[in-house]
Image: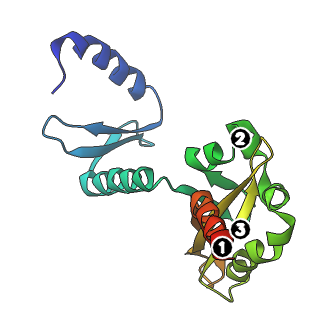
């Protein structure tokens, strides 16, 4: 399935991989199927090679990414044990931030971006999920854009992973920019008054 022009490069890469104790890669075959290839050295000097068909999961991941992109959803996840978080590019773009600023953001950094009038509501659902009293939350609140204006968001999230003892381990969610809807609501309220 490898074009002749790329065969020598592929062969060199494969030989270099065999020098390592273990390697893993994902490959797409010409028929469209995806496989995860894992190879490990054994104590006796042999090699064990495992090929797993991951077509269904890869197809599902691509479909999910298309839905997230189409919905213009900002996604995030927080590991409750470490405090580490991961945000997608839309989350960063929505607030005019750069990736480096978000890496070090943390819970307190996020909290500092929340409008002072919205802090209690914005963090209540998250904290209820973190302490196990709720499985999910939904809240509208404002976040400060890097340029100083406020971005209205609809936040939805919930517990996405649990420890073996049933305690929440990870919380994940989405943010949708609802600034336009909030402006329209305000305009309608002025017209009605």
Circle 3 sits on which residue? 141
Residue at which label 2 appears:
97
Determine contact: label 1, label 3, CB under 8 Å: no
Question: Is any atom of residue 49 visible in this view?
Answer: no
Q: Earlier in the sequence, mark 1 or mark 3?
A: 3
How far apart marks 1 and 2 lie (CA) works out to 32 Å
Which residue is at the far bottom?
A: 133
- SS class, disc 1: helix
Secondary structure of residue under mark 2: loop
The percent coordinates of residue 85 (x first, y second) are 68, 56
Q: Position of residue 119 (x, y in %)?
A: 82, 70
The answer to which quarter of the image holds residue 4 is top left
Compared across the picture, whether 181 is left or right of 27 comes to right
Kindly identify the residue that appears in the image at 58 percent across and 71 percent down.
156
Dots 1 and 2: beta carbons under 8 Å? no
- The answer to whether 20 is drawn above or below residue 4 in the figure is below
Mark toward the viewer: 1 or 2: 1
Question: Spatial distance from mark 1 to mark 3, Cα to Cα?
Answer: 19 Å
- Residue drawn at x 78%, y 55% is 106
For numbered disc 3, what is the local secondary structure? strand
Of the numbered discs 1 and 2, the one sitting upstream in the chain is 2
* Residue that numbered label 1 is attached to: 189
The crowding category of the residue bearing disc 2, from other C-alpha atoms within 10 Å (few below 14, some 14 to 19, many at least 20), is: some
Q: In the rendered view of the protein, which quadrant contains the N terminus?
A: top left
**Residue ID at (25%, 45%):** 34
Q: Position of residue 61 (x, y in %)?
A: 37, 54
């Amino acid at each position: 399935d490898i074009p002749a022009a790329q065969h020598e490069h592929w062969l060199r890469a494969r030989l270099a991989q065999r020098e390592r104790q273990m390697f893993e890669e994902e490959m797409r075959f010409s028929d469209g199927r995806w496989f995860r290839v894992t190879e490990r050295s054994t104590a006796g000097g042999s090699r064990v090679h495992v090929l797993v068909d991951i077509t269904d999961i890869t197809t599902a991941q691509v479909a999910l990414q298309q839905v997230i992109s189409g919905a213009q959803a900002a996604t995030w996840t927080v590991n409750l044990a470490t405090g580490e978080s991961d945000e997608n590019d839309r989350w960063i773009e929505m607030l005019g931030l750069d990736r480096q600023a978000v890496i070090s953001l943390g819970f307190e950094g996020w909290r500092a971006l929340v409008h002072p009038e919205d802090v209690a509501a914005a963090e209540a659902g998250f904290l209820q999920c973190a302490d196990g009293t709720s499985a999910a939350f939904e809240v509208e609140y404002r976040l400060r854009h890097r340029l100083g204006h406020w971005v209205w968001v609809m936040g939805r999230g919930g517990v996405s992973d649990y420890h073996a003892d049933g305690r929440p381990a990870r919380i994940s969610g989405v943010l949708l920019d609802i600034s336009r809807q909030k402006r329209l609501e305000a305009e309608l309220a002025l017209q009605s008054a």
